[in-house]
Amino acid sequence: MNKKNQVIELFTGYSYANKETQEMKANASVTLVKSENKIILVDTMTAWDKDVLLKQLKSYHVQPEDVNFLVCTHGHSDHCGNMNLFTNATHFLGSCVSFRHLYYYHDFEKNPYVLDNDVEVMFTPGHTSTCVSLIVKNSTAEKNGTIAIVGDLFEKEEDIFDDSLWIEAGTEMEKMQRQNRLKVAEIADFIVPGHGPKFKVTDEMIEKLRLDLHM
């Protein structure tokens, strides 16, 4: 049996909209995954957060050169601001996969990109047209559950019952985002959203997401 995959929330993202000033204060969640054979980092906050990120990694005995895969869920600056720190890693910038000057073609619409046993990158467009999520099965979560680390597919747990939270945060493909929100929720026991803490997926949430497809 494969060893369990360890999922560590290094930084809990946040987002606070100010409609009066037309501004949003936001930063992305950062997640470290120690799988059976690889070290994977998901999202990197902004370029101004370098020291915070390095300190958090060091607390789990990880140096930048130890990271095998860097998955930036999409190309917004709060999710990919420190990609240059991880030069030993294969980079995912959304569905674009590269290492140094080499770019790798993968048909994400047909198959996820497998990183290790029970760990894969899944194509989940909506917030942007190239968004991806990391799906971690056999995790250290309750009952060896599946954790989906989704970037801004979900802003935060509250956006399931208040659509305005994710729509006003920006969506390039609203219908597609609704479809992928349901798709991910149906396979995940827990979700790490782009701007909030990890939450448990409930039957009530799934039913709400199914209803949303008919809006």
Image: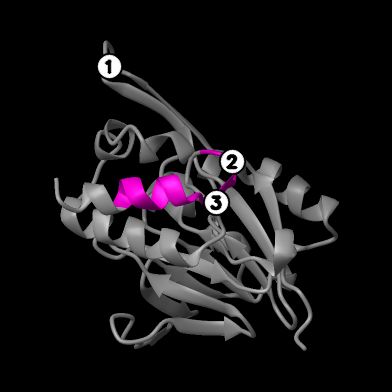
Residue 130, given in percent of the width and then of the height, sits at 29, 65
Tag 2–tag 1 contact (CB < 8 Å):
no
Is 71 contained in the magenta span? no
Instruction: Give residue 19's mark.
Output: 1
Q: Quadrant of residue 124?
A: bottom left
* Cα separation between marks 3 and 1: 26 Å
In reply to whether residue 204 is colored magenta, the answer given is: yes
| SS of the residue under disc 1 | loop
Q: Is residue 147 above or below residue 153?
A: below
- Residue picked out by circle 3: 192
- Rounded to the nearest angstrom, the CA distance separating label 2 from label 1 is 23 Å
Residue type highlighted by circle 2? Pro
On the question of residue 126 being in view, the answer is no
- Foreground residue among 54 and 10: 10
| Sooner in the amino-acid sequence: mark 2 or mark 1 | 1
Of the numbered discs 3 and 1, the one sitting upstream in the chain is 1
Residue sitting at 26 percent across and 20 percent down?
22
Of circles 2 and 1, the one toward us is 2
> Magenta residues, as a range?
196-209
Secondary structure under tag 2 reads loop
> Does residue 67 appear in the picture of this structure?
yes
Which class describes the residues within 10 Å of circle 2: few (<14), some (14-19), or many (20+)?
some
Residue position for label 2: 197
Residue at horizontal 45 percent and vertical 32 percent from the top: 26
x and y percentages locating residue 112 in the rendered image: 42, 81
- Residue at 50% across, 49% down: 202
Query: Do callouts 3 and 2 mark residues in contact (Cβ within 8 Å)?
Result: yes
Which residue type carries mark 1? Lys
Left or right, 150 with respect to 199, comes to left
For label 3, count other residues whose C-alpha is less than 10 Å away and answer few (under 14), some (14-19) or many (20+).
many
